[in-house]
Amino acid sequence: MFEGRLRLFLVWLCATLFLAPASIAVAQEKDGVGDLKLPGISNYATPKSETSLARGTAGPITLSAQLTDKGADITRGIVWRVFKPEAVNGKLPMVASAHGGSAVFQLEPGSYLVHASYGRAGATKRITVGNEARRESLVLDAGGLKLDAVLSGGVRIPPKNLRFSIYEGTAEPNGDRALIIPDVAPNSVVRLNAGIYHIVSTYGAVNAVIRSDIRVEAGKLTEATVEHHAAEITMKLVRESGGEAIADTSWSLLNESGDPIKETVGAFASMVLAEGDYTIIAKNRDRIYQKDFTVVAGQNQELEVLATEAAAMDPEEGAD
């Protein structure tokens, strides 16, 4: 009888000493307490699947970008976008984004595509996120472009009358080029990937256009100034030299080949024209007046068309 009670006591004692720690450990794991030193468990049940029993958030990944290899990190102006690499309905799902300089993302483990855009410059990289913190950097291979234009002799052009368009450096077989950025203001800095670009500078809104190819170098600011050979011309129809402009006048401008290049209505016709020879036709009250003139680069002028000059022609008489 005594031996039987002693045997039961020993069984209870062993269960208390060896099973209690395991029960405590499980409870603490469920509570999420990870800083306690718990006794190790030498035996464990085989998982029914390959999925880890302890699932936690992946380690943070820090992304940074540089203009050139071994260059300093860009501290502002970057737009980060993180995509899953598998397309859904033809599009890559975006899972995260950030603005500024370096960015830190907390992502689930797996593979991602990261895109960094800096102005019109950009780069894409595939990354793999695991359970440990890591860093990834993207080299944009980019620089800056600053554009301006002057007249002959270095005369400044009013910025309000000057615009630039930036195209791909390589033309298509049909001669067309892909437009990258339209309507760029002078002296503004545009960020672009390194390479050659086709620049179109437009002074005014008629035909004062200059085209040039410019190379952008990584990590550098490229400043380019083109020279326009043009002038501002103001035309008016008058009854006598130095007289008042006649209102309600229709204007047609022809180039040297006789092709119309500009039409407008008003007492004055003001426009910027490339140097060369032109013909202006003014129509007022069914009377037509014509005058040939020449534009000299950098020489702005006011041009008078006399309503009484011998070149005037009545449309009905011209028809006879």
Image (spheres, rainbow, N blue to C red):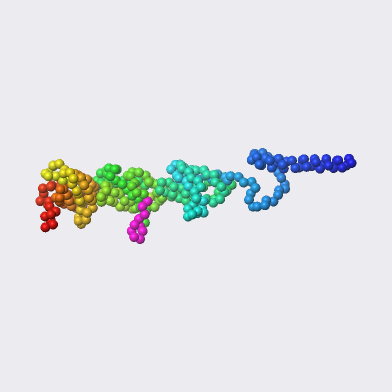
Which percent across, then down, holds residue 77? 43, 43
Which percent across, then down, holds residue 221? 38, 46
Of the pair 85 and 134, the residue shown nearer to us:
85
Span shown in magenta = 171-180
Most extreme residue toward the right, as rendered?
Answer: 1
Q: Quadrant of the C terminus?
A: bottom left
Q: Quadrant of the N terminus?
A: top right
Residue that appears at 12% across and 51% down: 312
The answer to whether residue 174 is seen in the rendering is yes
The answer to whether residue 69 is seen in the rendering is no
Residue that appears at 44% across and 42% down: 76
Which percent across, then down, holds residue 228? 26, 49
Of the pair 207 and 154, the residue shown nearer to us:
207
Q: Is residue 63 magenta?
A: no
- From the viewer's perspective, is 74 left or right of 240? right
Which percent across, then down, holds residue 45? 70, 49
Of the pair 40 and 214, the residue shown nearer to us:
40
Q: Is residue 176 magenta?
A: yes
Most extreme residue toward the bottom, as rendered?
Answer: 173
Residue that appears at 39% across and 47% down: 191
